[in-house]
Amino acid sequence: MAKHYEIRSLFKFILMQFLFACASCVSWAGSPVSINGTIGQIANGWDGQGYILVLYSPSAPTGCSMANNFYIPKSAPYYQEAVANAMLAFTTKSNVTVVTDGTCDGSRANVIAVQLFQ
């Protein structure tokens, strides 16, 4: 009985260590960052992997090396809506708020939302 208890305790310990390690891996994403401005350029990636926005904004504190450049990955579940909002904002020269997840894809900030306002 004692060995069974020790094995179960060891298994729980290993499981908790694994879950803790997984949680710390997932928590690398930064806090959401919102930047206001107008979209000055839109482009698709060369291999169709996503959509790129260049925002005219006085400051874009994204933490990425290309501060006013943003990336919408094609694999994102909100891809179509974000691209549609970006195209509408670009065409109408509307003000936008680009929301990033606080991470960079290469040198561009990852977009999680494109919001239009007047």
Image: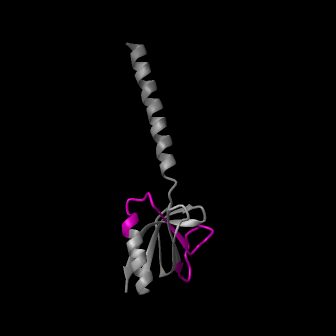
Give me the residue at 46% from left, 30% from top.
13
Q: Is residue 33 above or below residue 96?
A: above
Q: Which colour scheme is used?
A: one colour
**Quadrant (top left, top right, bottom left, bottom right) of the N terminus:** top left
Position of residue 107 measured from the top left corner of the image (x, y, whole percent): 60, 65
Q: Quadrant of residue 54?
A: bottom right
The one of 32 and 14 positioned closer to us in this rendering = 32
Question: Which of 75/96 is in front?
Answer: 75
Q: Per the image, is 33 magenta?
A: no
Q: Residue 92: x percent and y percent?
A: 40, 86
Instruction: Give the left or right position of residue 62, taking residue 117 as reference.
Output: right
Residue sitting at x 56%, y 83%: 58
At 48% from the left and 43% from the top, the residue drawn is 22
**Residue 71 lies within the magenta run:** yes
In the picture as drawn, the residue positioned furthest to the right comes out as 65
Query: Looking at the image, how many numbered discs can be counted on the residues?
Result: 0
For the view shown, which residue lies furthest in the top direction?
Answer: 1
Is residue 76 left or right of 43 when viewed as pictured?
left
Where is residue 94? Give x, y as percent: 41, 85
Q: What range of the chain is rendered magenta? A: 55-81
Q: Nearer the viewer, residue 67 or 39?
A: 39
Residue at horizontal 50 percent and vertical 41 percent from the top: 21
